[in-house]
Every structure is written in structure tokens, then in C-alpha cells.
């Protein structure tokens, strides 16, 4: 019995290859004839390349914030009202136990759900992120004064009562 002849005479296998049309390789973009129904690439090299491209696309799309959520904008409930001050519910204040934050700090949550910080004697503190501190002109303009309190990534400021 001729082995080559018995394989070519198999009607199911012959129909399978005739039913698969040429496909475009996801890795290199060239046309190829697949040997399996689930094959999307012409070679192992192209399969690895296509996998890297998909991984980059997924990572990039995950890094882009949703267009409906702007993380730099003020919350929708925040108006242009200068007198608006985030108030913490007194019973919601607790000693701050975040790693790297100074001892004696109290933490609460404002009306928008963001963390707010207070000194032991009750002054509200504002976090400013970044290595550089605010200039004297900026401090006068926004009516802030620097404190000795720092946290990982920035420092705390308090409002000047004038």
C-alpha cells in the first residue's frame, strides 16, 4: 500500500484544504494558505510579531484615559465659587496612616470623595505634587504658605488667613 496515495485519497482532508482560502498574515501582511482553520499567521516569526503588536495595542489603549473622564479637570460639582471649601464630616476624620506621610496628620474625605488632610490643630492642608516648590509670587497669588510637612512626591501647604 502506498502511504502517499492513501493520504491524497482521503476526501475529508482534501475538502478541508480546498475550503480554506488564502488569508492575510497578521504579522507580515502577506497572503498565505493556512494549514489550520484557526491559523492567522504564516510562520512562527510572524505569530510572535503579531502577538507583540497586539500586546502594545492593548497596553496603549489601557494607558489612554477615557474621553468622558478628565482626570485633570475639577469635579463637575465644583463651581467657580471662591467661597467653596471642601468640608470633612468631623466624625470621618482619622489619623493618617499612609506610608511616608508625617505623623500627626488627620485625613478625611470631601464631598467629592477625594482625600483631604488637616493638621492636628485643625488647619486644612493642600497637597502640591512635584519636586519643585511654589514660587513666592504663586504663594501670594493663591494665598498659601509652605509648611514643613512633606509626603512622597510633594509637600503640604496651608491657606493664609488674611
Image (tube, rainbow, N blue to C red):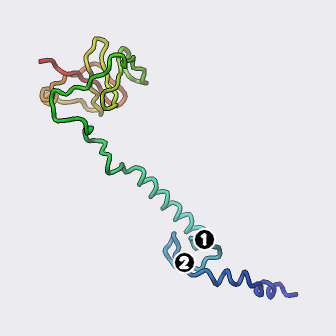
Quarter holding residue 48: bottom right
Alpha carbon distance from label 1 to label 2? 9 Å
Asked whether, in this view, residue 41 is left or right of residue 6, the answer is left
Q: Position of residue 87 (x, y in %)?
A: 27, 23
Quarter holding residue 157: top left
Q: Position of residue 109 (x, y in %)?
A: 34, 26
Q: Residue at x 28, y 11 (%)?
A: 121
Q: Residue at x 40, y 49 (%)?
A: 63
Q: For the residue labelled by badge 2, is the local secondary structure a helix, a strand or a loop?
A: strand
Q: Residue furthest right?
A: 1
Which mark is drawn over residue 152? none
Task: State whether residue 25 is above or below residue 88.
Answer: below
Q: Position of residue 62 (x, y in %)?
A: 42, 51
Answer few, some or many: residues within 10 Å of disc 2's Cα (few below 14, many 20 plus, some between 14 and 19).
some
Q: For the residue labelled by badge 1, is the local secondary structure a helix, a strand or a loop?
A: loop
Q: Position of residue 107 (x, y in %)?
A: 36, 21
Contact, mark 1 vs mark 2 (Cβ under 8 Å):
yes
Answer few, some or many: residues within 10 Å of disc 1's Cα (few below 14, many 20 plus, some between 14 and 19).
some
Which mark is drawn over residue 39? 1
Which mark is drawn over residue 23? 2
For the C terminus, the quadrant is top left
| 1 or 2: tag closer to the N-terminus | 2
Q: Residue at x 25, y 26 (%)?
A: 86
The residue closer to the viewer here, 54 or 80, is 80
For the N terminus, the quadrant is bottom right
The residue closer to the viewer here, 30 or 76, is 76
Asked whether, in this view, residue 5 is left or right of residue 75, the answer is right
Q: Residue at x 36, y 14 (%)?
A: 104
Asked whether, in this view, residue 96 is left or right of residue 14, the answer is left
The residue closer to the viewer here, 93 or 2, is 93
Amino acid at each position: 500500500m502506498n502511504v502517499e496515495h492513501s493520504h491524497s485519497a482521503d476526501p475529508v482532508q482534501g475538502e478541508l484544504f480546498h475550503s480554506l482560502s488564502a488569508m492575510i498574515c497578521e504579522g507580515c501582511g502577506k497572503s498565505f494558505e493556512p494549514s489550520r482553520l484557526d491559523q492567522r499567521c504564516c510562520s512562527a516569526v510572524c505569530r510572535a510579531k503579531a502577538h507583540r503588536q497586539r500586546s502594545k495595542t492593548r497596553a496603549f489603549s489601557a494607558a489612554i484615559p477615557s474621553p468622558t473622564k478628565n482626570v485633570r479637570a475639577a469635579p463637575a460639582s465644583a463651581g467657580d465659587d471662591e467661597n467653596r471649601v471642601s468640608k470633612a464630616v468631623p466624625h470621618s476624620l482619622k489619623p493618617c496612616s499612609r506610608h511616608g506621610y508625617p505623623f500627626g496628620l488627620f485625613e478625611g474625605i470631601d464631598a467629592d470623595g477625594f482625600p483631604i488632610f488637616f493638621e492636628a490643630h485643625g488647619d486644612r492642608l493642600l497637597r502640591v505634587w512635584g519636586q519643585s516648590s511654589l514660587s513666592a509670587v504663586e504663594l501670594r497669588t493663591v494665598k498659601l504658605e509652605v509648611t514643613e510637612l512633606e509626603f512622597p512626591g510633594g509637600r503640604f501647604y496651608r491657606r493664609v488667613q488674611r
